[in-house]
Every structure is written in structure tokens, then in C-alpha cells.
Image: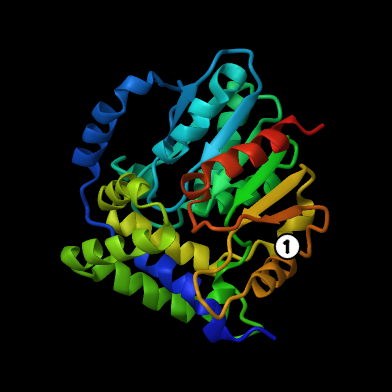
Amino acid sequence: MIRTASIFAFGAAAVLLAGAMPALAQDGHTNHAEGHAAHGHAHADFASDRLHVRVDGPEGAPDLILIPGLSSSPEIWQGVVDHLGDRYRIHRIHVQGFAGAPAKGNASGPVAAPVAEEIARYIREQGLQKPAVVGHSMGGTMGMMLAARHPDLVGKLMVVDMMPFMGAMFGPPGTTAESVVPVADQVFTAQSTAPRDQYLTQAKAAVTAMIKTEAARSGPLQDTENSDQQVSAAAFRELIVTDLRPELGKITAPTEVLYVKFNDPRMTDAITDAIYQMSFSTLPDAKLKRIDDSAHFIMLDQPQAFYGDLDAFLSAK
């Protein structure tokens, strides 16, 4: 049996990341757009108060949807976009309230589940034919929601360093979505009411813990600083109380999960592997693979390993 103390470290780091959210949304969005205009992406013609979508790649190429995590921007996928070139039509999700985007419909209440539903609507209205979906962290949660609740829409699913029930890390063995609600409420209150300078201090500590590569930290840190405090706090609460394990069996798309060893010296490779195997036991056909020498942002810490796995995942029949 895995002790709660041994698995809390990952959750604690995530709390730090989610806790660092000053309300700089509109100004941050302007600066972000100007800073990355050189990439030449376009925005999809899709009206939503939950998300907007950047599109790269030629029309007619296979469709690929990339979903970033909590308080992250589509820029975390820029290396993937550059690597894939014109081989795919890439749709990068930008969640309202994260990384400079005004909160709009995400200003109150749940975030992940409504955004997942909007992605499903986007796939339908844009006429995408069973796109591959790749989600990092909270984006992985939304990918699992999408594939389980709309199995007819998803061709393949890759989950990057996310489990189907994060709340298990915030309680003793046997913790349920219902029993963890008081903890989730405490976390939400602490994050949503903490002063701005505390957010910034925690953000720096969290990014340091979640990205080993020092040169890659500035972008995610900026995204965190430019995210809306209330949206991020609400989204993190939602992640704690969302248990997707009972829904995994509804996923029909080939699924791969990439993950890293938990950032705690007590957490061995074997223990980490066992946690992921247990967490995804209701999706027995899923391929689980640990990426070594990486923290949470695998695509930034181990880009070549990530690109290799992504290429194999996308090309597999």
C-alpha cells in the first residue's frame, strides 16, 4: 500500500503552481499575441466564451488537437508544431482565463468539463475527422473527458503526465471524489484569496519543480503570471474532485500515457509505475510509458524523447 505522505509531493507541487495566479489577463493576452506573432498561426473561426483555437499547418493534412495544462498557453506546444511542420493540421487550444486570455465564460464554476464539451463542439462544427488529441496535465484530463464522453469524435488520445483521479493524492488510500471535497474547498479558498506577491513566489518555486531545464522555465512562468487567479483556482479544485476512472472504459480510441517519476526521493520508479498502472486499470489497453530524467513538462525537459514517442503514436495504425 502506498502511503499518502509518499504521494503528496506531486500534489503539493501542483498546488504551488495553481496558487500563483495574479489577475493580469487582458494585458498579458496582448503581450502574448505580440510576442508570438512571428509563428504565423491563425485563429479558427469558432465562437466560444470558453476557449479559442490557434491553427497551424495545411488544410487537408491529418488533424491534431493539442491541449495545454493548468495556466498554460498554446506556446508550450511550439516545439511540437515546429517538429511536425506541414505534416499535420494542428489545432492548439487556448483556455479562456489562462495565459493572458480574458476569463469570459470560465470566470466562475468548473473549467475542464465545459472546455472539453466545447472541444467536442469544435470538432463537430469544424468537420474534423477523428483527430488525434494530445493533452498535458489538466489538458490530459480534458482529453480523457473528451474521449470518454464523445468516443465517436477522437481518433487517438495521448495523455501527458496526468492521472484520471488527481484527488487520490490529497487523501488516504480509498479517497473518493466525495470525500476529498473538503480538502478541495480548502485549497480553492487558499488560492483564490491569497495575495498577489504570494502567488508570484509560489509560481517560481512550482516552475522550478516542474521543469528541470532552466532555460525553458520563463515561458510557463510568464503564462502563470498572466493567468486569472479565480479561473485557475476553480480549475484546480475541479481537478481534485474529478474521478475519471469509472469513465475510462468508455474510451475506444487507442490511448498512450506518458509520465515521469514523482518529484519525491521516496517515490521510486517502481512505485510510480505501480500508481499509474493502478490508476489506468479500467483502461487495460492503454500504453503506459515512463520518461526518465524529466519533470512534469516532458515536452520541454525531454523534447527529443517526446517527439519520438509522439511520431510513433501518430503514425501507428
Q: Position of residue 205 (x, y in %)?
A: 31, 65
* Left or right, residue 41 beside residue 171: left
Structure colour scheme: rainbow
Q: Position of residue 260 (x, y in %)?
A: 58, 60
Q: Does residue 153 appear in the picture of this structure?
A: no
Q: Position of residue 112 (x, y in %)?
A: 50, 52
> In the image, is residue 77 above or below residue 167?
above
Give me the residue at 51% from left, 54% from top: 138
Give me the residue at 57% from left, 34% from top: 65
Q: Quarter of the image for the C terminus: give it.
A: top right
Quarter holding residue 211:
bottom left
> In the image, is residue 207 above or below residue 37?
below
Q: Which residue is mark 1?
A: 280
Viewer-closest of 287 and 153:
287
> In the image, is residue 56 above or below residue 159?
above
Give me the residue at 48% from left, 52% from top: 297
Q: Position of residue 202 (x, y in %)?
A: 28, 66
